[in-house]
Amino acid sequence: MKRRDRENDSGEQRQKLMGLGNRSMGKSYYPELQRRLHELESFRDLLNRINDTIFIVDAHNGLILDMAGAAELMTGCPSHQLMGQAFSEILPHHVRKHVTNLLSSERATLTMETEFNCPMCEGRVPTPVEITIQFPEGDEGDRAVVVARDISERKQAEEEIKRYSEELEIRVKQRTRELDQANEAKSEFMSFISHELRTPMTSVLGFIRIMRKKLVKSIYPSVQTDSPKVRRNMDQVLQNVDVIIAEGDRLLQLVNDLLDLAKHEASKMEYHMRISDLNRMLDRAMAAAAGFFDDSEADFVQEIPPGLPPVTADDDRLIQVILNLLSNAEKFCKEGTITLRASVEGAYAVICVEDTGIGIPPALHKAVFDKFTQVGENHQKIKQGTGLGLPICQHIVAAHGGKIWVESTPGAGSKFFFTLPILGGRTEI
Ligand code: ADP
């Protein structure tokens, strides 16, 4: 095309751009032209003052055709140097090819995070940006409009959040380690103290029992007195000795439970796991529990089907769990019925100790498995335990791969369940 033709061509284009159509550019149009030019300049001026940058890029060769906005600020490069540059030059090396492909072949609208740099400036800190590449309708994909937004502040905030969360993670880890150490030290201390208390307590209790026996069997019968005061004193002494024995037993139980719990918490409890016959283990538990029911008004019922599947277990520890549940049931159900039940549900054997006693309020169904939890007023009238039995049961059941929980309605009784995984999975009985 000849130069003049080209000039005419671009003149017509400009006319179209300014909305003058194909009308010939006579002198009468000059004021209108001036006005439109002025409008365009004001518009560009406005665009140059926005914080974003708009690039017009030739989609075929990737060169920057025009730009407005904060290009200099974002790239660190004077606008006149950017004009005519390849757009990909201001991007980091690893995305250049990708963006060039996007512009020349894919031609799809896309938003991505990247960085802007000046191809001519050495050592400048790149500006993090979010760019949206669009292809205006009716342009046949010849030009891409790239809108870029400076996301330095957002990136900085994200970096700070990341740094804080990393710091927090380190602190949490450190704190957890310290807590674990403190917990271990506490467990060791508890187990040391419990151990040291158990020996003298056992001998104190042993001697007081011998003293009581001697008092009842030989000393009192040989006392020859009709003095009511002496008789009253003798009865009083015997009652006091009984209180010492009862409280001593409770103290010893507490010490034993503390020692047990300390071992569980420090994962130092030894388990002798072997393949266990569940029916035989339950028989042993019932035989050991017979003593609880000798003086009890409650009826004791067993609902244990024959041929329960085998489990892997330390029988003695599981018997300890069942005895604890049965002794609690007896404590809190003086007249109703206590039932020991076993069944199989899926891959688990389910053991249940049910009583028709005073029950537990729903709000405490979880808490009774916490250390030293003892339920409210009604319960306090009943002889107190240590509040450690159920937490110990929970440790033992967990060590067997099972779960323990309670279902209970105050006034209507409680059902304590625990599960044990069946050896080899699901078994029908
Ligand atoms: P404790 O030695 O006090 O019985 P446990 O940990 O075995 O300690 O039980 C905690 C508390 O849970 C008991 O003090 C009692 O308040 C409540 N509890 C346990 N079993 C029953 C039950 N069968 N019926 C009602 N309350 C119960």
Image: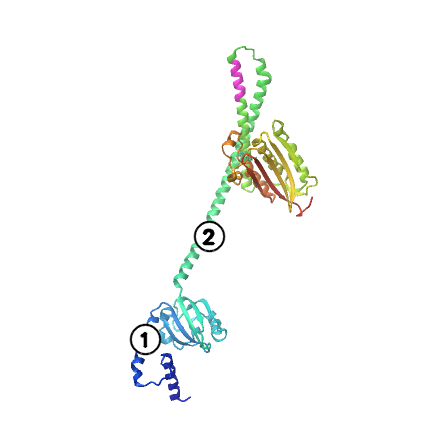
Which quadrant would the C terminus be assigned to in this image? top right
Identity of the amino acid at label 1?
A: Glu
Label 2 secondary element: helix
Q: Quadrant of residue 300?
A: top right
Residue at 59% x, 20% y is 213
From the image, give the main secondary structure of the stretch colored magenta: helix
In the drawing, does residue 35 fall left or right of residue 128? left
Is residue 126 among the parts visible in the rendering? no
> In this rendering, is residue 401 above or below 106?
above
Q: Nearer the viewer, residue 200 or 129?
A: 129
Q: Residue furthest right?
A: 307
Which of the labelled discs sits on residue 169, or is there none?
A: 2
In the drawing, does residue 252 fall left or right of residue 279? left
Q: Quadrant of ligand 1?
A: top right
Q: Which residues are magenta?
A: 230-240
Q: Circle 2: is it few (<14), some (14-19), or many (20+) Cα within 10 Å?
A: few
Q: Give x and y (percent) for residue 327.
A: 59, 32
Q: Is residue 233 magenta?
A: yes
Q: Earlier in the sequence, mark 2 or mark 1?
A: 1
> In this rendering, is residue 321 above or below 125?
above
Which quadrant would the N terminus be assigned to in this image? bottom left
Q: Give x and y (percent) for residue 21.
A: 37, 82
Identity of the amino acid at label 2?
A: Glu
Q: Give x and y (percent) for residue 274.
A: 66, 42
